[in-house]
Amino acid sequence: MDWGALFVAFSIGLLGGAHCVGMCGGIMGALTMAVDQSNYQRRLYFIALYNVGRLTSYVLIAWVFYQFVSQINDYFTFQFMRYIAGLLLIAMGLYLANWWRGLVYLEKAGGYLWRYIQPVSRMLLPVDSPYKALLLGFVWGWLPCGLIYSALAYSLAAETSLQATMTMLAFALGTLPAVMASGLLAERLAVIIKYTFLRRGFALMIIVFGLWALMMAHQHSHV
C-alpha cells in the first residue's frame, strides 16, 4: 500500500474543502434543513447517511474506471494518467484561486452524464427515510465536479485496483469535514470561504501537490 499516495489524496480532499462547500454546501444545507430541526440526532443521522452514500459512489467510480484503464494493460497508459493527474491538480488549484477557470469545461463534459442521473435524485425527494438519504447521497456523488475528476485521475495512476479505490476513499474522507460541516454550519462556512487569502492558500497547496505528482511521474518514466 502506497501510504504517501493516500496522504496526498486525503490532503487534496481536505484542502479542496472550500470548493466542496461552494459546490455542495447549498445542497447539503437544503437537505439538512428539510429534516426536522428539533430532532438534532435525526439530522446528524441523515447527514451521515448522505455522506456514506457519497463516499461509496466515489469509490465505485474509481473501481469502475480503473478496471477500464487496466484492460488496456499498457505501462505508458498509467504513466499518462500520472501526468494527467498532476496537470488536473494544478488546474484545480488555479480554479480554486479563481486564476484560471479552464476546469469548468471538464465539469460541463461531466454534465452530460449528470443529465441522465439527476432525474433519479428527484424520485428520492422528499428525504423521509434513511434508505432515501443513503441513495440520494450515492446519486449526489456523481455530480460533475473538477475536484473529483482530479482525484479520480490521481487514483487511476495507482498500480493496483485496491490502491486506486483506497486512494479515492482517502480523498473522500478528506472532503468529509467541509461537507459535514456545511450541513450544520452552512451560513458560517459560506462567509469563511469568501476570504480570498484562505482560498488562495488552499489553492497553492493543491498546486504544489500537482507539481509533486508531475515530478513523480517524470521519475517513474525514467526508471
Image: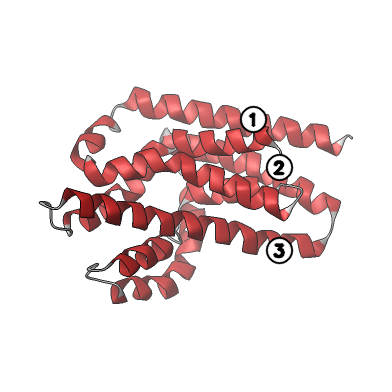
| Label 1 sits on residue | 211
- Contact, CB < 8 Å: mark 2 with mark 1? no
- On the question of residue 187 being in view, the answer is yes
The residue tagged 3 is 67
Residue 30, position as x, y percentages in the image? 21, 55
Q: Can residue 100 be seen in this view?
A: no
Q: Please give left or right for residue 18 compared with residue 3 in the image.
A: left
Q: Disc 2 or 3, which lies upstream in sequence? A: 3
The quarter of the displayed image where residue 197 is located: top left
Q: Residue at x 83, y 60 (%)?
A: 73
- Label 1: few (<14), some (14–19) or many (≥20) C-alpha neighbours in 10 Å: some
Instruction: Say which mark, if any, is on residue 24.
Output: none
Q: Which residue is drawn at 35% across and 65% down?
A: 136
Mark 3 or mark 1: whose residue is earlier in sequence = 3
Q: Which residue is drawn at 30% across and 65% down?
A: 130
Q: Residue type at mark 3?
A: Gln
Which mark, by number, is residue 83? 2
Spatial distance from mark 2 to mark 1, Cα to Cα? Answer: 10 Å
